[in-house]
Amino acid sequence: MDPWVIASAGAALVGALLFLIYLHRRRGYVLLWVVGWLLIAAAAVAAEGYPDAPRFAGLYHAAIVLATTAFAVSASTVGRPLAWTPRHWLAVAALGGWLALGTPAPGAAGPAVPGSLAAIVAGVVASGRYARLSYARSFTGAGLMAVAFGAITLATAGTLTAMATGRADAIEPWVMLTFIAHATLAVGMHLLVFEDTTRELREANQRLDAARADLRDLALTDALTGAYNRRYFDEIIGRELERHKRANEPLTVAFIDVNRFKSVNDGHGHAAGDMLLRDVSEFFARKLRETDYIFRWGGDEFLVLMACSAADAERRLAALRLEYESAPLITALGGGVGLAIGCAEAPPGIADIDPVIAAADAAMYANKSARVV
């Protein structure tokens, strides 16, 4: 069987397989590959009559150049849309028409010179683009394609040289290299599709993980103040009690209440009240240690879980209260707006935090009643 017939059938088969991939993936670079392989199949058919008939030489080189151009363009569309204008396509069509008609030139290799040179240029561009793609994204398939295009370009130059020097016996090794390079090219393309699909799945999973983390944050934080909510308190309190029990460390619950919060809403509007609550939450979130937690407990009350004794918590929170009440926002609101704070330490080995919460709440109300603000 004529090897060019086998080559044509093989190229058409690769194009058909890639077209099936395109139907599934809908990627522009895969469609350009399909076009390229079909043009290679057409070139192999034209090669049966080349170099005896000049018109076959023109058709052969036109198909090869257009195929290599399609491959070169495809490298810039991996992961992005095709950015070609009608002017680009018109230029490619004009080049293909010129090569198909043939260019008169002296010597046996004359008809092959324009097409071969154009094919060499397109091959160098394709090899360079896929080499950059391989380096930028660590795609092994793109690397194989860069090597394959380099080998095809070398074979084209070698074939042209052998024809120009009249050494017909030197053409066969270059033809064999061309066949091997095209087989490598087909393998690289399928590997690149797999790698690109894997990359997209990995990026999709990363976006999904980020979205899941965002949803978790929304579920566990108070929308107004950014502090943790009761749901998160219920989630971690068992773990915190167990950890402090094992480490034999103190654990204190503190309540923080905004004094005269209703007067802020009544006198300045609910927007001012919301701003005050956010400001309280952000202030203590900045000032507390990383091992401490602040929760919005409800209304204008915040609960703080502190890894220290009640005496230490009272000293620290009293200093923070004085600092906060001298801030410009509290001064501007006036009218006795401030903070009431109460603390209660969890007994060693306690399993139920509710009595401690109740004790801290009672201490806070005692502080509020004594007007210690």
Image (cartoon, grey):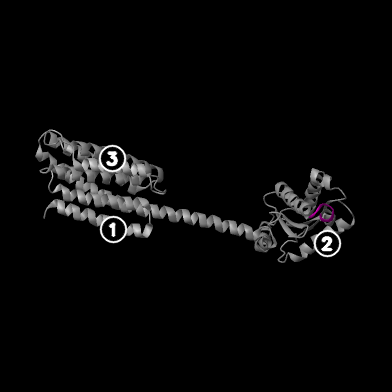
Quick check: is 267 in the magenta stretch?
A: yes
| Residue highlighted by disc 1 | 17
Identify the image quadrant of residue 172. Answer: top left
Identify the image quadrant of residue 343. Answer: bottom right
Question: What amino acid is found at the position of numbered circle 1 in the picture?
Answer: Leu
Q: Residues within 10 Å of mark 2 (few under 14, many from 20)?
A: some
> Residue 122 — which label?
3
> Is there any visible trace of residue 281 in the rendered image?
yes
| Residue highlighted by disc 2 | 362
Reading the chain from its start, which is encountered first: label 3 or label 1? 1
Q: Residue 287: horizontal and vertical position, in percent?
A: 72, 46
Per the picture, the main secondary structure of the magenta-coloured stretch is helix
Question: What amino acid is found at the position of numbered circle 3 in the picture?
Answer: Ala
Q: Residues within 10 Å of mark 3 (few under 14, many from 20)?
A: many
| Residue found 80% across the figure and 43% down from its top | 328
Reading the chain from its start, which is encountered first: label 1 or label 2? 1
Q: Total label count?
A: 3
- Up the image or down, 163 lies above or below 211; here it is above
Reading the chain from its start, which is encountered first: label 3 or label 2? 3
Q: What stretch is highlighted in magenta?
A: 265-269
Q: Residue 99: horizontal and vertical position, in percent?
A: 22, 41
Q: Nearer the viewer, residue 269 or 371?
A: 269
| Residue found 54% across the figure and 55% down from its top | 210
Labels 1, 2: front one: 1
The CA distance from mark 1 to mark 2 is 76 Å
Q: Residue 323: horizontal and vertical position, in percent?
A: 80, 44
